[in-house]
């Protein structure tokens, strides 16, 4: 590692993370909110939510015609959002809009509340 430059300027992982953040912008947050409102089953399933978002942005024809290799290339080149980014964005949307919480999350909160009440 060179002492003359900053280590992150040449770091591939930092560049990849920055690019993925640029891919998942405010418009995608609105689209994730729309998907969660329209399809409640996506509230507890990040993988299906991510594929639904990718399907929306690529379009039906391109999504269905895409091979696994093309998908992997698009994913690694950060042209489609990562599953982790979609999961983070879902959590942000659900924090801002509690009515979009999934069944699992809601039942966990209810159980947590009951346990706290029983400990008093």
Image (cartoon, rainbow, N blue to C red):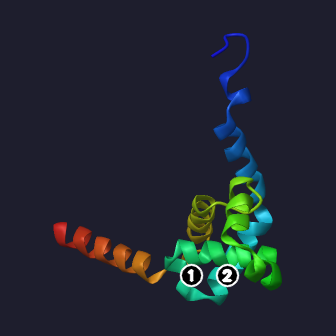
Quarter assignment of residue 98: bottom right
Distance CA(mark 2)–CA(mark 1): 8 Å
Q: Earlier in the sequence, mark 2 or mark 1?
A: 2
> Which numbered circle lies on residue 42?
1
- Tell me where residue 2 appears, x and y as whole percent: 67, 13
Q: Quadrant of the C terminus?
A: bottom left
Residue nearer the viewer, 36 or 3: 3
Relative vertical location of residue 87 with respect to residue 1 in this rendering, above or below: below
- Tell me where residue 5 appears, x and y as whole percent: 73, 16
Q: Which residue is painted at 64% across and 40% down in the image?
A: 13
Q: What element does badge 1 sit on?
A: helix
Q: Residues within 10 Å of mark 1 (few under 14, many from 20)?
A: many
> Which numbered circle lies on residue 35?
2
> Which numbered circle lies on residue 33?
none
- Tell me where residue 17 appears, x and y as whole percent: 67, 46
Q: Which residue is painted at 44% across and 83% down in the image?
A: 103
Q: Which residue is painted at 62% across and 59% down in the image?
A: 85
Residue nearer the viewer, 36 or 4: 4
């Amino acid at each position: 590692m060179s002492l003359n430059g900053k280590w992150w300027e040449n770091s591939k992982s930092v560049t990849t993370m920055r690019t993925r953040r640029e891919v998942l912008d405010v418009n995608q947050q609105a689209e994730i909110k729309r998907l969660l409102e329209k399809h409640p089953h996506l509230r507890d399933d990040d993988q299906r939510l991510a594929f639904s978002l990718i399907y929306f942005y690529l379009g039906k024809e391109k999504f269905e015609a895409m091979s696994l290799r093309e998908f992997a290339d698009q994913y690694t080149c950060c042209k489609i959002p990562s599953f982790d980014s979609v999961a983070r964005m879902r959590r942000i949307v659900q924090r801002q809009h509690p009515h979009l919480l999934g069944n699992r999350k809601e039942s966990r909160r209810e159980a947590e509340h009951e346990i706290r009440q029983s400990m008093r």
